Amino acid sequence: MKPTRLSKISIKWQIFAYLALFVAGTLLLLWLLQVVFLQSFYRTIKIYDLKATAGKIAANLDRVDLQSYLFSAAHPSEADITVTDLSGNVLSSSQNPGGGRGMSASLNYGSLVSQAQKSGGSLLKWLSDNGGGSDPAAPGQPGGGVSPFRGGQSNSVAYVKIVSRKSGGKAAVILTANISPVDATVLTIRTQLICVTFLMLVFALLLALLISRRISKPIIRLNNSARELARGNYGVSFDGKGYRETSELGGTLSYAAEELGKTESLRRELIANISHDLRTPLTMITGYAEVMRDLPGENTPENVQVVIDEANRLSTLVNDVLDLSKLEASTEELRIVRFNLTESIRAILGRAKKLTEPDGVTIRFLHGGDAWVDGDELRVSQVVYNLVGNAITYTGADKLVLVRQQINAGRVRIEVMDTGAGIPPEKIPFIWDRYYKVEKSHRRAAVGTGLGLSIVKTILEKHRARYGVQSTAGQGSVFWFEFEIKEPPAGGENAPV
Ligand code: ADP
């Protein structure tokens, strides 16, 4: 796969880029707040504070201790507070009566009050150095509308609020405050910000290196293991320790490797088995045929029978392999019909009896009424054939094979029993595997393909039927499977479902 442009950049640089972006964003925000808008923020806050103080004083105008109240209110907002009547005569002030007037020394209260009255009851006014007050920026706007950006010439502001007293009449609350310029502060902050920017960038780079090393470590480990896997080492383990995601990925990859390994060993085993199984009968056929051709007395019916037997064995093997691969690859769908399982078994056993009677094998079928099931009749017959075939092969000296049908709770159970040596318990889980033979030296094992039970298993699993085996050493084995019983079709004939 061609890497995309982004995927060519290493984790380290990507993390650094994101961190640098974050640092740049934070610093830009700081710069905007601390440098560009600091002055206006400061003024806005100060003016808001003045207005809030004016409101509080308006509510307390009738206090007896107004003077000391004004004094205490003036302190936190660093303002001078004066209360006048509507002609500008001082009624009370936050300043010492004897101490002269501070910021408001040269203020013409009368003019401020009348301007405030004209502009609707409140006035915000920047004061020029001579104390006369500059022109309001937006006359007629109650409470100000005066731009705080005054180019640094005017640093004092007066706020006038006309209020009605509870005791009757009106008064004016006049607050004057100094808003000191922030130019020097801005310069300091700007220098600091430049230093901080460099420091933060270096810090971001170091952090990116550190994080990327930590993050990429498990990824690099996983990548190395994946390379090993690609080279065919299926035993490789994927160590994704470090993060949940990488350890999960490690687990998944280890599982995948294990499964790949299994498939690979199965493939090798399959080829080895098939080639071995094919070679033996082929050698026999060629050998016997050559003997019969070269030696006149050897062309006997027995020898011809050996050739026929071996050829049959070859075709059984090829058919089994084909059956299994077709079943497993699901190329052939089951043709499910409703059929009479009891009748089907009866027919199979009838044919088997004919073939095995000369060998002295007794096959018995114990059953009650007929049981109808849904399934692929041909495939289910194959299951019965294989199980009965195995029972005949492995049964004991009495050469007895018992097939029993039991009906219970809506299910029909077919049991194929023999009286042979049984299967050792530790081997039972493996007998369903392809090419598994419990005892390689067994008379039939030398002939059997080892595929019979895996065909049985595949067919029964495709039918979602239950199946299993019970075996006691020395007493024989019982192979069983179960199907759900269905109603017989109206005509009593097999019918598609
Ligand atoms: P095979 O062609 O060798 O019979 P199967 O898949 O049918 O292959 O059986 C696998 C192995 O299971 C056999 O080789 C045999 O060892 C064991 N086995 C199967 N059926 C019986 C049985 N009825 N009694 C004892 N062993 C059995």
Image (tube, rainbow, N blue to C red):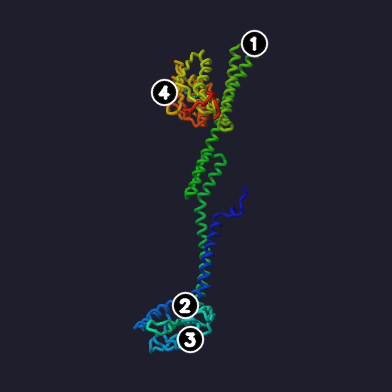
Q: Sequence order check: which comes first, mark 1 or mark 2?
A: 2
Q: In this image, 319 relative to 480: left or right? A: right
How far apart are the two marked residues, 1 and 2, measured between alpha carbons?
129 Å
Q: Which residue is painted at 58% across and 18% down in the image?
A: 309
Of residue 121 and residue 334, the one placed in the foreground of this image is 121
**SS for tag 4?**
loop
**SS for tag 3?**
helix
Residue type, label 3: Ser
Of residue 297 and residue 322, the one placed in the foreground of this image is 322
Other-residue count near label 1 (Cα within 10 Å), few / some / many at <14 / 14–19 / ≥20: few
Image disc number at residue 296: 1
Q: Sequence order check: which comes first, mark 1 or mark 3?
A: 3
Q: Sequence order check: which comes first, mark 2 or mark 3?
A: 2
Q: Nearer the viewer, mark 4 or mark 1?
A: 4
Q: Nearer the viewer, mark 1 or mark 2?
A: 2
- The image quarter containing residue 472 is top left
Residue type, label 2: Ile
Q: Nearer the viewer, mark 2 or mark 3?
A: 3
Q: Quadrant of the C terminus?
A: top right
Residue that label 4 marks = 473
Q: Nearer the viewer, mark 2 or mark 4?
A: 2
Whether residue 339 is visible to the viewer of this picture, yes or no, is yes
15 above or below 77? Answer: above
Residue type, label 4: Ala
Residue that label 2 marks = 47
Residue that label 3 marks = 114
Q: Sequence order check: which comes first, mark 4 or mark 1?
A: 1
28 above or below 221? Answer: below
Q: Sequence order check: which comes first, mark 3 or mark 4?
A: 3
How far apart are the two marked residues, 1 and 3, measured between alpha carbons?
147 Å
